[in-house]
Image: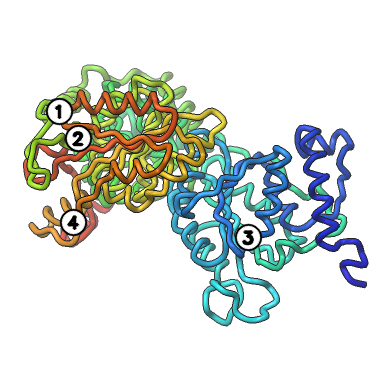
Amino acid sequence: MTIRDKGLDYEHLAGQRVDRALVIARAGGLNEALQQGALSPRIDLTLSEAIVLGLLRQGVHKFIVIFGHGSTEIGEVLRVYQEAGLLETYGVRNEIAAAHAATALRWVTGEKAAVVTSIGPGALQALAGSLAAASDGLGVWFLLGDETTEDEGPNMQQIPRHEQQSFLRLYQSIGESYCLHTPQALGVALRRGLNTVDHPHQAGPFYLLLPMNTQAAPIANFNLDELPTGSPPPLGQAVDDGRYEEAVELLLKAHRVVVKVGGGARQAGTELQGFLELVDGIAVTSPLVSGVIPYDHPRNMTVGGSKGSISGNYAMEQADLLVSVGSRSVCQSDSSRTGYPQVKHVININADTQSAMHYNRTLAFVGDAAATLKHLNEILRQKPEKQSGDSTWFGDCQDKRKEWDAFKSERYDNATLFDDVWKKEVLTQPVAIKCAADWARTHEDVVNFFDAGDVQANGFQVVEDDRLGRTFTETGASYMGFAVSALLAGGLAERPFHGLAFTGDGSFTMNPQILIDGAQHGVKGTVLLLDNRRMGAITGLQDAQYSHEHATNDKVEVDYLAWASAVKGVQAKHGGFSTESLREALEASYNYNGLSLVYVPVYFGPDPLGGLGAYGRWNVGNWCEDVQALRHEIGL
């Protein structure tokens, strides 16, 4: 008996698909259709339709897509379900940009999205783009075309080797992956994806590989109860086996407590501020959590690390006890493990055991940061009060914070410098960023995104966020082109926001298709393009290490305003050569009902007033030998 004899031929299933989508839409959703009896709990359908139903059940209603021959069947399912009003499909022009947009949407709004690609180059581009979600702990679905399962011969665009599941092994090197070689395994695949994408502490991308011949494969009498729901539960406070009392004893004896605030502390702002007062602690933040402690909090020394601040790095260098909260301790965060040369003890609070045990001499707390800090605070309040507000440690750090603020003010007071490329006085990059970031805080719905490079490095030294959620700096992968691609999320969100992408000429030209995708999908946002005609961060590193630059600048004049104006619906504005003209251009972009590009030429050169400097160590280039020697000397 053939599939057709069983009534499972494709034409029959496709017709049922249309009717089923309308039934689900009228009922208000899949679960409602089942509860009302409008939909049978057992149905015949193709694998691709079952995938879409499974994702709808998990709250995934947005699909960012670049279709190809490896995704035609799932594309057809998305068409039918979109016409029924159950989901939205957004066609874009680059898989990396799609990955970034989905990542930004989850980061800013919490909404889930799926990226859909073909087989081969498109899938590999999505893999590259997913590094941001993996590095920053953000859950995104990836539905990727894959080679057929019957091995009839090489498939076009597969990895050219005579072996099975090469793509699966490749994706497994980045994160959780599953190949739907067998359609009946769908329930397990979706469960593993849900557990990854919705993990409360260590979320990440999930790669669901879809062989081209199984996408349209029929599944008879499929039980819709196999489509999983629910989310993994969050951890509570770390277990109390006596270590809280041990930690309190260490904290009260220490003279100079520094608290490093990482991405895992995003939801612990209130507890952190109370903790700092109780232990006479000084906070040093990572760029990922700008605003979790208000910039003007007296105990906030701002960023520290390889590209830190005068005050942040001072606190790290002088501390005798480190409290690490939700940090992966990446190289730039702790100066390649040399950032705390005087620390004798570490208290590490993290939901991940490996991260919690990163340093030697560590008392580890594996659990939710907010809940663990809350319990620590309760115990601390029962102890004799520690000298805090007028302590020597607090006073010394306050002095360094004033020094840092004065250092920055001097640069802000010298807004323009003569630049050899532009042959005139132009804004410095710190001043342009300061102007735009201050402007953004005057509008509650403006969200800042920073692209990698010199813009990002200056940016997290400049921003003065008063709350979490104003600024998103993708420092996990430090992906060039992330910020401009992230603007698409503002047009996809249930509650649209005005994205402001701080980008350089290098990052923008890696993902310029936002001009087209933004116009297509109704993005209301701004590309702030700061042009110094080079990859400034790397030029600066080359100068610092070798006193020469090489292959990081160009002599090609690009009319970015003409480029943006060539896309109908995009507004192009010159930001001028003063903070006043830049604010006017930004306000015009905010009032424009669409995407704008604001272009600003900025200074690059040897004048120290043109940048904000670096205050830590880094294990790169010809610095490695000295940095590594110091790390082993410290032994932390």
**Residue type of the residue flagged with mark 1:** Tyr
Q: Earlier in the sequence, mark 2 or mark 4?
A: 2
Identity of the residue drawn at 20% across and 23% down: 580
The label shown at residue 50 is none
Q: Is residue 634 above or below residue 122?
A: above
Alpha carbon distance from label 2 to label 4: 22 Å
Secondary structure at badge 4 equals loop
The label shown at residue 71 is 3
Mark 3–mark 2 CB contact (< 8 Å): no
Q: Nearer the viewer, residue 345 or 196?
A: 196
Identity of the residue drawn at 64% across and 47% down: 194
Alpha carbon distance from label 3 to label 2: 45 Å
Q: Earlier in the sequence, mark 3 or mark 2?
A: 3
Q: Position of residue 190 (x, y in %)?
A: 68, 52
* Viewer-side label of 2, 4: 4
**Residue type of the residue flagged with mark 4:** Asp
Task: Classify residue 255 by image quadrant.
Answer: top left
Mark 2 neighbour class, 10 Å CA radius: few under 14, some 14 to 19, many 20 or more = many
Mark 1–mark 2 CB contact (< 8 Å): yes
Secondary structure at badge 3 equals loop
Q: Position of residue 292 (x, y in %)?
A: 39, 28
The label shown at residue 430 is 2
**Residue that numbered label 1 is attached to:** 412
**Residue that numbered label 4 is attached to:** 554
Alpha carbon distance from label 1 to label 4: 28 Å
Identity of the residue drawn at 49% across and 57% down: 126
